[in-house]
Image (cartoon, helix red, strand yellow):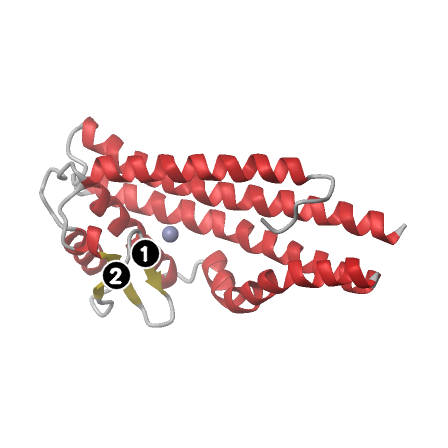
Amino acid sequence: MDFLFGPYSSLILLIFVASLLIQGYLSRTYGKWSRIANPRQLTGAQVARMMLDENGLHHIPVQAVPGQLSDHYDPVRKTVNLSQGNYAVPSVSAMAVAAHEVGHALQDKVRMPALVLRGRLAVPLSLGMNLAPLLLLAGVFLKLTGLIWVGVLLFGAALLFHLITLPVEFDASRRALAYLDSRGLNGGPETANGARTVLTAAALTYVAGFAMALAQLLNVLGIARSQSD
Ligand SMILES: [Zn+2]
C-alpha cells in the first residue's frame, strides 16, 4: 500500500481486496484448466511453435523460463518465454497462455502502436512509479508543493502505463483465441470455454491494475489539493 491516508484511501483498500480476489480466481481457473488436457494434447511449446511458424515467425525461439505464470514475450530479444508449467504440459491452460504470448509476437510483427509505445515507456515509467510515492511523501513532510505535484504527475504516468497495457493484453488474447478456434485446437465447446476462461481471468488482473492506478491518482490529487490550499 502506498498511502493509508487521503480522500480515496478506502477506495484503494476496496480495490486492493478486489485485486486479491481476482488473483485467487486466476489461480483457481488456471489450476483447474492446467489439469485438463487440450484435445490434441499439444504442449504450450508446441502450440507456440505452430502459431509462430504459421505466421512466418520461424526466427523467434520458444524458451522455458523458471517461475509460475512467468510467461512473457520479450520484444527486445524477440523470444517467446513460457513457464515450466506451460512449456512441456499439454493442458488447456498451457495452450491458452502460449497462444497469448505468441499474440504479443504478432503485435510486434505488425508494430502495433500501443505495444511499441508500451515498450518505449516501460523503463522510464517503472522508475517513475517507484519514485512517485517517495516524492509525494517527501513533499508532504517538507511542505514543498512543487515536489508534491511532481509526485502526482508520476502517478498520472503510472495510470497511462496501465491504460496502454489494457488494449495490448486484450488484443493478444483475441489473437490467441482466434488462432485456436481457426485451427480447431479448442476442440468441443467445453474446451473452448476453458481457453477463454483462463485468458479472461488473466485480463481481469490488468483491469484491477488499471483501477488501482486510477484510485491512487485520485487519492494523491486529493492530497495535493489539500496541501496546496
Ligand atoms: Zn500478455
Report the front residue among 107 and 47.
Answer: 47
Instruction: Give left or right: position of 2 versus 76.
Output: right
Q: Residues within 10 Å of mark 2 (few under 14, many from 20)?
A: few
Instruction: Give left or right: position of 7 versus 16.
Output: right
Q: Is residue 7 visible?
A: yes
For badge 1, the amino acid type reads Ser
Determine which quarter of the picture holds residue 185.
top left
Q: Position of residue 49 (x, y in %)?
A: 18, 58
Q: Position of residue 35 (x, y in %)?
A: 16, 38
Determine which quarter of the picture holds residue 106.
bottom left
Q: Position of residue 43 (x, y in %)?
A: 14, 50
Q: How many marks?
A: 2
Placement of 126 over or under 101, stated as above or below:
below
| Residue drawn at point x = 40 percent, y = 40 percent | 23
Instruction: Give left or right: position of 65 versus 3.
Output: left
Report the front residue among 73 and 223.
Answer: 223
- Secondary element at image label 1: loop
Q: Position of residue 32 (x, y in %)?
A: 23, 35
Q: Which residue in the structure is indicated by mark 2? A: 66
Determine which quarter of the picture holds residue 124.
bottom right
Spatial distance from mark 1 to mark 2, Cα to Cα?
Answer: 7 Å
In the picture as drawn, the residue positioned furthest to the right comes out as 229
| Residue drawn at point x = 23 percent, y = 33 percent | 192
Q: Is residue 200 visible?
A: no
Report the front residue among 57 and 44.
Answer: 44
In the picture as drawn, the residue positioned furthest to the bottom comes out as 77
Report the front residue among 137 and 145.
Answer: 137
Q: Which residue in the structure is indicated by mark 1? A: 70
Q: Is mark 2 within 8 Å of ligand 1?
A: no
For badge 2, the amino acid type reads Pro
Q: Tell me whether the residue at label 1 lies in contact with that at label 2, contact meaning CB atoms closer than 8 angstroms.
A: yes
| Residue drawn at point x = 54 percent, y = 63 percent | 126
